[in-house]
Amino acid sequence: LSAARDLAQKLYGNHSEHFATSLYNLARLLKDKGIYFEAKSLYERAIVIWEDIHGPDHPKVSTGRKYLAKLLKADGKDDEAKRQYDIAIATQEKILDPNSPNYASDLLDLAGLLKDQGYYDKAKPHYECALKLSEEKFGPDHPKVAKALNDLASLLDLQGNYDQAKQLHERALRIRQENLGPNHPDVAESLNNLAQSLRHQAKYDEAKPLCERALKIR
């Protein structure tokens, strides 16, 4: 990724879309490795470039701020993280367009930002709307529907609605297995999430084989 960044800078300049994307990708890698200080600097540079190219109210800017906020939170800088989350939420709210083909996906992004900040009651109707739109557009058994089910179920888990969350996780798992096959990473995600719902209900014997299956996939 460092080589890709350097190549993008050489070919397109240090204020280009390609260079900003390379900075962003490298920042995500560094964050995953725990190199927070350098990752933070790269995220901030990417955001500045995207704002200059697209303006402040653009999905890429919102995404950059979201991942910068996640990094800051992981680094224990809660006040800075909250500021970035709040800006990202405001941006995402501005760019929502019911006529956009990506409306359901944008709703999921906004709901995810609200969930990360603990605004569960505000996030829930966005998740529910995204699920309904996905079902209407793609049918009830599409992987995009499974994604919306998974995200809503994860919120319900956080709210303590374990029975309802379990039902949604089971449906998402079934859809993913039928569409993607039994060894897809998304199936592993659903297995782990369903196991978590079962653990919350102290159903450890049911959760254990699901976790074991997920480990074999990964």
Image (tube, rainbow, N blue to C red):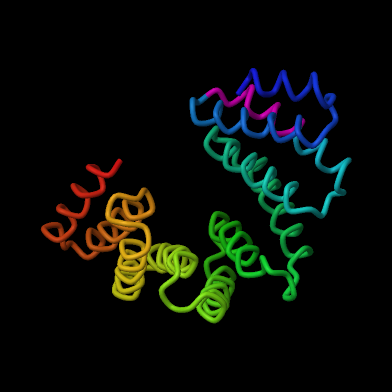
Left or right: 57 as drawn, with respect to 186: right
Q: Magenta stretch mostly in which secondary structure? A: helix
- Residue at the (76%, 38%) spot, across then down: 47
Image spot of residue 11 (x, y percent): 80, 23
Image spot of residue 215 (x, y percent): 24, 43
Left or right: 197 as drawn, with respect to 65: left
Q: Is residue 140 above or below residue 68?
A: below
Look at the image and say whether residue 178 sits in the magenta stretch.
no
Q: Where, quadrant-wise, is the N terminus in this rendering?
A: top right
First to last magenta residue range:
35-45
Look at the image and say whether residue 36 sits in the magenta stretch.
yes
Q: Nearer the viewer, residue 76 or 71?
A: 71
Q: Is residue 168 above or below residue 6?
A: below
Residue reaching furthest to the left: 205
Q: Nearer the viewer, residue 75 or 147?
A: 147
- Residue at the (59%, 71%) spot, across then down: 122
Image spot of residue 71 (x, y percent): 58, 36
- Residue at the (64%, 39%) spot, across then down: 68
In this rendering, the count of numbered labels is 0
Left or right: 68 as drawn, with respect to 44: left
Q: Where, quadrant-wise, is the C terminus in this rendering?
A: top left
